[in-house]
């Protein structure tokens, strides 16, 4: 939790009404904050340059220049300046323009008696964090990664070695790992370093295509072979002849299609749907799954003979939580890509932010990290990403309780997790209500683990989808008010 003090910090308040300035000064002095007041925008900017206040609170309608102009000048002078805009008339355009120019927040004057102290405390804490932040110098550049696979951990070095060994062969490869861990990137690296690299690499998600269309997608079909087949279609196997076919989510492939795929792997040939001609298949297969295929075999959901044909060479991608030393490298890499693609300055990571990211278990793995950083870049109000800029900044059970933070999902029983929760609350004298806390955290994690699939998340939580929807609406409302 943030323990930075907001006392002994300076706030500059700019408003043309002296009565309001007197009221605001009294409100903030109670918190031990030094307050400077000014009625003129031009003078306010001069004071900002001289005094370097921790926070500026300015009315939107000022003379000779408005509050938005003052905000723009302050942010041009100091890109990390904390500025709050306030107005009696919070129009849509005013709010959007304020946030676009980098305001920390926009407040309606009528709500200030209830919101000012909370928002000011938050802004001052952010300013204190920024001053104490230790920006880190990126260890590597984007150009040092040819295939977007980032990692210097021992686990990832083993993956790279396997990629190098199998690249020059045509043996089928089965890539396993949790969702979001980068399985397609491994498939692309295998293709790029192989002799097939000048030919096509085509990817197909077996879970995203209905069963009645998947066979046609893979092998093609003849005109009139089924209702709607108005013309002949060339399937993926023919399209990437001489290249590589990446079959993602192979564990979701229907059994009927598995049989035909097995024939291709055994005989190196196939026929289009509705056709008699035998077509030779010069294609290298790389498959990927986040399912345990051995369990699927026992459940009669996956063919055992196909499994052994696909798993000639197996490559397992570790989850991100198992390679914590790669998190900083990945974060820097994604920030560099975002800066290049959006033509914006490169944001740095503070040491505190890195520490928080390395303590988080990342149930969505590398994909979650990338999405988190994209969101943070959009919402950040300074040149350094602080803990407040990350969605992970919301209080998390795992982050707050050492017994949980030090564990993984596989080495902690439900009973041990519950015991750790209660012990932590008693030990720390925490007065929060446990059930709402657990409900919020578990709901967010269930949505992350199921890639926001409400049906699967509801089943995981043991509630109906309707109940989950209501819970998500409530959590969204709470988040928007923070």
Image: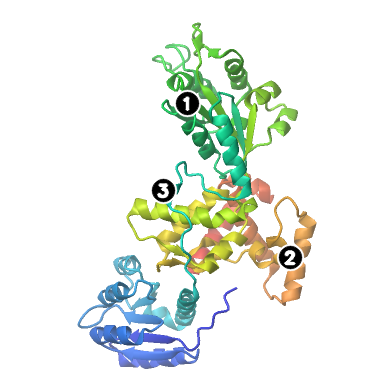
233 and 385: which is toward the camera = 385
What number of labels is visible? 3
- Above or below for 178 versus 175: below
**Residue identified by numbered label 1:** 195
Mark with earlier residue (2, 3): 3
Question: Closer to us: mark 2 or mark 3?
Answer: 3
Mark with earlier residue (3, 1): 3
- Please give the name of the residue rendered at 59% of the width and 57% of the height, measured from the top-left corner: 471
Question: Closer to us: mark 2 or mark 1?
Answer: 1
Residue 475 location (% of width, % of height)? 56, 61
Residue 421 circle label: 2
- Above or below for 287 versus 89: above
- Please give the name of the residue rendered at 47% of the width and 26% of the height, measured from the top-left corner: 195
The crowding category of the residue bearing disc 3, from other C-alpha atoms within 10 Å (few below 14, some 14 to 19, many at least 20), is few
C-beta proximity under 8 Å, tags 3 and 1: no
Residue 210 circle label: none
Q: Kindly state the secondary structure of the residue where label 1 is placed.
A: loop
In this rendering, position of residue 360 left or right of residue 349:
right
C-beta proximity under 8 Å, tags 2 and 3: no
Residue 100 location (% of width, % of height)? 33, 65
**How far apart in space, not on screen, are marks 2 and 3 (Cα)?**
44 Å
Which residue in the rendered view is the most extreme toward the top?
Answer: 276
Residue 143 circle label: 3
196 and 83: which is toward the camera = 196
Q: Kindly state the secondary structure of the residue where label 3 is placed.
A: helix
Tell me where residue 231 sits by quadrant. top left
- Above or below for 215 versus 482: above
**How far apart in space, not on screen, are marks 3 and 1 (Cα)?**
23 Å
406 and 336: which is toward the camera = 336
């Amino acid at each position: 939790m943030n323990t930075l003090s907001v006392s002994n910090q300076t706030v500059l308040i700019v408003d043309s009404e002296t009565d309001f300035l007197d009221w605001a000064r009294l409100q903030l002095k109670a918190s031990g904050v030094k307050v400077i007041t000014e009625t003129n925008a031009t003078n306010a900017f001069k004071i900002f340059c001289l005094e370097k206040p921790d926070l500026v609170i300015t009315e939107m309608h000022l003379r000779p220049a408005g509050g938005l102009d003052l905000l723009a000048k302050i942010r041009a002078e100091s890109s990390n300046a904390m500025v709050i805009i306030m107005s009696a008339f919070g129009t849509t355009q005013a709010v959007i323009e304020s946030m676009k120019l980098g305001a920390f927040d926009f407040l309606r004057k009528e709500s200030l008696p209830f919101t000012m102290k909370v928002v000011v405390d938050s802004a001052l804490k952010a300013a204190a964090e920024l001053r104490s932040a230790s920006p880190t110098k990126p260890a590597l550049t984007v150009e040092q990664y040819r295939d977007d696979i980032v990692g210097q951990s021992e686990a990832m070095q083993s993956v790279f070695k396997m990629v190098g060994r199998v690249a020059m062969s045509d043996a089928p490869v089965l890539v396993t790992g949790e969702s979001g861990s980068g399985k397609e990137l491994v498939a692309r690296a295998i293709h790029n370093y192989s002799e097939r690299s000048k030919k096509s690499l085509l990817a197909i998600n077996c879970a995203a295509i209905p069963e009645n269309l998947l066979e046609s997608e893979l092998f093609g079909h003849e005109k009139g072979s089924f209702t709607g087949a108005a013309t002949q279609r060339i399937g993926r196997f023919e399209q990437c002849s001489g290249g590589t076919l990446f079959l993602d989510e192979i564990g979701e492939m229907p059994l009927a299609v598995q049989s035909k795929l097995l024939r291709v792997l055994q005989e190196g040939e196939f026929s289009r749907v509705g056709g008699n001609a035998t077509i030779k298949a010069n294609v290298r297969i790389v498959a990927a799954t986040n399912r345990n295929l051995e369990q699927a075999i026992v459940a009669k959901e996956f063919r055992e003979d196909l499994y052994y044909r696909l798993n000639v060479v197996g490559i397992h991608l570790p989850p991100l939580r198992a390679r914590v030393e790669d998190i900083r490298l990945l974060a820097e890499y994604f920030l560099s890509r975002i800066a290049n693609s959006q033509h914006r300055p490169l944001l740095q990571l503070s040491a505190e932010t890195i520490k928080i990211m390395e303590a988080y278990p990342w149930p969505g793995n590398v994909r979650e990290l990338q999405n988190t950083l994209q969101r943070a870049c959009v919402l950040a109000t300074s040149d350094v990403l602080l803990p407040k800029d990350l969605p992970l900044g919301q209080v998390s059970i795992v982050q707050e309780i050492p017994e949980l933070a030090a564990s993984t999902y596989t080495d902690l029983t439900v009973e041990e997790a519950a015991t750790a929760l209660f012990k932590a609350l008693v030990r720390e004298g925490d007065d929060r209500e446990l059930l709402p806390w657990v409900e919020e955290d578990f709901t967010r994690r269930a949505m992350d683990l199921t890639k926001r699939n409400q049906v699967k998340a509801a089943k995981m939580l043991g509630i109906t989808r309707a109940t989950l929807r209501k819970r998500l609406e409530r959590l969204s409302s709470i988040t928007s008010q923070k």
